[in-house]
Image: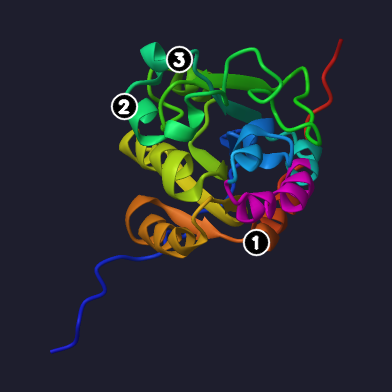
Amino acid sequence: MAKTQPFADPTWSLVPGHTALILIDLQNDVLSNDGWYAKSGVDINHMRRVIEPTKRMLDAARAKGVPVIWTTHGLHNEVDAGVFWDTRPFLHGGGFRVGSWGHSIYDEFEVLPDEWLVDKRRLSAFYNTEMDTILRGLAAETVVITGVLTNQCVAGTMKDAMYRDYKSILIEDCCGTTLPELHEPTVMMARVGWGAVWDLDRLCEGLRKLPEPATRVA
């Protein structure tokens, strides 16, 4: 008896007016060599792989008027950090502190005035944030998800998007983590359980097929 494949790659495409781009936690503290992670001795090389591909992705998405939503992970201290505090002892002395340079989006990126910035306290960008409200207001049905860490906040956000019936597309080469050995297993979990997995070339090809954005009248 032939085996039945227990999952299938969804045949989704980018739909004009119903697609949004989410960039998870591309902050100075995780991407900069002067950030808290690097200064604490954490290997950030795999996370830094996302920098140049993300620039290319942003150019392609903005050219077609795709809404862009950035997230940051922030905390003040153990009061609002939750159990994250117990699992990240190297953050007790600093890192992700709201209002700090490290908490801000990485210096090589720019958040444009018409883009959204969602600050979160937990791994998922949906938990106790305005993310769902923004996406509903944008009439988004498909969400393109990228950022860091692949196996933590990216995975948590993608799962939560699926729970809310968004069509989630993970862009593999625009994701990174502190534990590279967990990157591919997480990508596989995303592919078989939470949505679709594309590479940047496929995303850019899909973006090129979108119509030119309508010119706004002042």
Q: Residue at x 63, y 49 (%)?
A: 44
Image quadrant in which the C terminus is located = top right
On residue 77, the disc is 3
Q: Is residue 50 magenta?
A: yes
On residue 78, the disc is none
Q: Amino acid at mark 3?
A: Asn
Label 1 belongs to which residue?
202
Would you say the magenta stretch is mainly helix, strand or loop? Answer: helix
Number of labels in the image equals 3
What secondary structure is found at the residue carrying circle 2? loop
Image: 156 above or below 116 = below
Give the CA distance from mark 2 to mark 3.
Answer: 11 Å
N-terminal label among 2 and 3: 3
Q: Which residues are magenta?
A: 42-58
In this image, 88 relative to 102: left or right? left
Image quadrant in which the N terminus is located = bottom left
Q: Residue at x 77, y 51 (%)?
A: 52
Q: Is residue 158 magenta?
A: no
Label 2 belongs to which residue?
83
Q: State if disc 3 and disc 1 touch (CB < 8 Å).
A: no
N-terminal label among 1 and 3: 3
Spot the residue most to the right.
218
Q: Residues within 10 Å of mark 1 (few under 14, many from 20)?
A: few
In this image, 211 relative to 183: left or right? right
Indicate the position of residue 197 as horizontal and vertical percent values.
Answer: 50, 58
Give the CA distance from mark 2 to mark 1.
Answer: 37 Å
Indicate the position of residue 160 as horizontal and vertical percent values.
Answer: 36, 35
